[in-house]
Image (cartoon, rainbow, N blue to C red):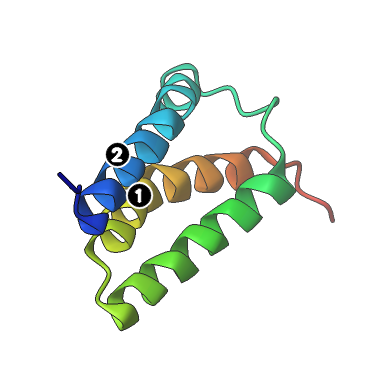
Amino acid sequence: MSIPAELIGYGAAALTTASFFPQAVKTLRSGDTRAISLGMYTLFTCGVTLWTIYGVMAGDGPVIAANVITLLPAAVVLQRKLADQPRKL
């Protein structure tokens, strides 16, 4: 019995996406972004955006699903982190 590669992809997408949510939910509930690296979150959100574009271009369902689901909370957390940055004059 062989498992279709796409099923493995959806399983991997579900696990990696699910692993992201506890920290995002905690950050959004507490509003505390001090422990979040602006550089890391910027790179992460840009990477998720590019993976989404790649998934659409390649017609890869698991890549699209994982990254679309992850992009929204990642973008919200990044926006909150940017809003918390001290303004430089």
Which residue is labeled 1 in the image? Answer: 72
Of the numbered discs 1 and 2, the one sitting upstream in the chain is 2
Q: Quadrant of residue 33?
A: top right
Q: Residue at x 58, y 22 (%)?
A: 32
Q: Nearer the viewer, residue 81 or 55?
A: 55
Quadrant in which the C terminus is drawn = bottom right
Taking depth in this image into account, of 25 and 53 the one nearest to the observer is 53
Instruction: State the quadrant of the N terminus.
Output: top left
Residue under the image location 51 percent in, 23 percent down: 31
Residue closest to the eye, 9 or 47: 9
How packed is label 1: few (under 14 Cα within 10 Å), some, or many (20 or more)?
some
The amino acid at mark 1 is: Leu
**Which image quarter: residue 62?**
bottom left
Residue at (35% x, 31% y) in the render? 18
Residue at 76% x, 41% y is 86
Judge whether 52 appears above or below 74 on screen: below
Residue 6's place in the image compared with 32, above or below, is below
Name the residue that disc number 2 marks: 14
Of the residues shown, which amino acid type is indicated by label 2? Ala
Q: Nearer the viewer, residue 12 or 24?
A: 12
| Residue 59 placement (x, y as % from top left) | 24, 76
The image position of residue 83, as x and y in percent, is 59, 44
Query: Under tag 1, what secondary structure?
Result: helix
**Which x, y percent locates residue 74?**
46, 45
Tell me, yes or no, whether the two marked residues, 1 and 2, touch with CB atoms within 8 Å: no
